[in-house]
Amino acid sequence: MSRLDLRDIPLPPSANLSTALRYYDVPFYRDHRQANEPLVDCGAHKLLCQPYYSRTDGVNFPYSQRFVGSSETITLRQSVVDRLKRADALLRPYAVRLCLLDGYRSIKTQQAIWDFYCSWVAQRHSHWTSQKIIEFAARFASDPRSFDAKNPKTWPVHCTGGAVDLTLVSLDGKHPIFMGSIFDDPAPVSATAYFEHKRVNEDSASEMVALRYRRLLYHVMIRSGFENYSAEWWHYDWGTQLWAFFRAKRTGRRTRAIYRYIEPNNPRRRRKRLRVTH
């Protein structure tokens, strides 16, 4: 390629930030024009979708099960879908495309994922305190235990329709690109910038592929307006509290969140009764 190859651009230091416990304090715009956007079917917009949590074949590791409340359709807010289509187009010259694994998530599914991580780490670290287990689980899943539809400090980002989990595949959708770890692996290797800080073995084709394609995914998504949750190479946000948090960290400019909690069958539910004061 004659132009600059995005796979050659290292990830910035800000991509190594990690939090899933602090974003709840980010304030919202009170009357943003995009706040009431409905959830739309990503597949209907010609985005490749392979819903992960509704799989019944047992190969959705590390879970190997279908989660309660999961959907066979991936839905997101309209502006998020528009930006994903932009990112997908930017990837075409690299002979790859986006593959969506999850978008809007029900509270039931969020709770099931949270319970899985807590159980997973408790089985492997029986000596850990409850607080340490919670802190570990919160690196990979928003804590839904105190969820209140009226309280913005309790809203998991996937339950707003502004968070998406995705990976890269070949243009025909048949061949996944090796990204260095499986999706939802609760391990340090899942951090977006892991291979930036590891001494990559240049004789290892797999490590070089993971390094270069994590860079590609990151730069394309950032150019399309998204922000990455740095503990997970697959997780990106637009319009959520987590998006606002990481945008401020990356750019130094504070912003507010757009998307509130939404229910799939009633996107305008009780909006006027929500009092966001923080």
Image (spheres, rainbow, N blue to C red):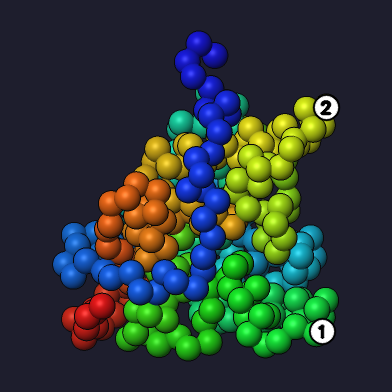
Where is 163 relative to 25, above or below? above
Q: Which residue is nearer to you in this view: 270 or 6?
A: 6
Residue drawn at x 50%, y 11% is 2
Expressed as whole percent of the image width and height from the top left, the position of residue 195 reads: 68, 42
The amino acid at mark 2 is Asp
At a point 66% along the width and 43% down the height, the residue shown is 197
Disc 1: which residue: 126
Nearest the camera: 47 or 239?
239
Query: Between residues 107 and 257, which one lies in front from this camera angle?
Result: 257
Q: Quadrant of the N terminus?
A: top right
**Residue 70 drawn at (x, y percent):** 59, 72
Q: Position of residue 94 (x, y in %)?
A: 57, 26
Dot 1 amino acid type = Ser
Q: Which residue is mark 2?
A: 203
- 245 relative to 231 in the view: left or right: left
Q: Please say whether residue 1 is visible from this viewpoint.
A: yes
Displayed quadrant of residue 54: bottom right
Give left or right: position of 32 versus 44: left
What is the secondary structure assignment of the residue under circle 1? loop
